[in-house]
Amino acid sequence: MNYSINIHQKQYEVEVDVVSGGVAYVIVNGEPYEVYFEKQGEAQVVTSATKSVAVPTKPKASAISVATAAHHIIAPIPGLILDISVKEGDAVKPGQVVVVIDAMKMENKIVATEHGTVRQIHVDKGAQVGTGHVIMVIE
């Protein structure tokens, strides 16, 4: 959900992406954050907010879908790049698997979230990536 918030006469555009287990993944003026909150009585109270590199979106089936406002495909978890199923210049569509990451002996399919063209691939098959590592750029 998208919100326009005014705090101390400064305007913020906020997109709330995923809220799960006391953490909200949000994008504020194009910058991703993790906002931690807890329930106190009937209200949700923000306890802290940290800048985040990876902003996970809701998974579809067994695939993990991750992107930032800049159309970067980023690693949602640390792991080993098992497969890159696209190359620079390829057209992609939402839901298309673009890379597979092995993490804790599980294959995690990373999918494109928008139509576009792969402009840059920043990793090779067999590379280790950390959470938030930019894998590729799609425009």
Image (cartoon, helix red, strand yellow):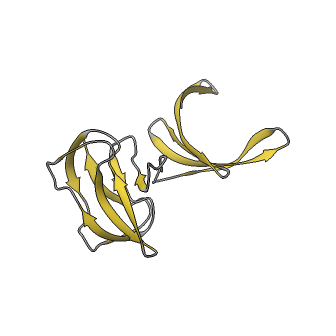
For image coordinates 44% across by 38% down, the residue present is 30
Q: Residue at x 32, y 40 (%)?
A: 114
**Where is residue 11, by image quadrant?**
top right
Q: Is residue 125 left or right of residue 113?
A: left
Q: Position of residue 74 (x, y in %)?
A: 37, 55
- Please provide percent x and percent y for residue 93: 26, 42
Where's residue 7, x and y in %? 63, 28
Tally of numbered discs: 0
Front residue of this view, candidates 5 and 78: 78
Q: Is residue 122 above or below residue 4?
A: below
Q: Nearer the viewer, residue 80 or 30?
A: 80
Q: Nearer the viewer, residue 83 or 10?
A: 83
Q: Quadrant of the C terminus?
A: top left
User: From the viewer's perspective, is 122 left or right of 25?
Assistant: left
93 left or right of 44 in image? left
Residue 9 locus on image (x, y percent)? 60, 23
The residue depicted at 16 percent of the width and 56 percent of the height is 87
Above or below, comparing residue 93 to residue 83 in the picture: above
**As drawn, 6 above or below 39:** above
Residue closest to the far right = 41
Q: Residue at x 51, y 52 (%)?
A: 52
Q: Residue furthest front?
A: 61
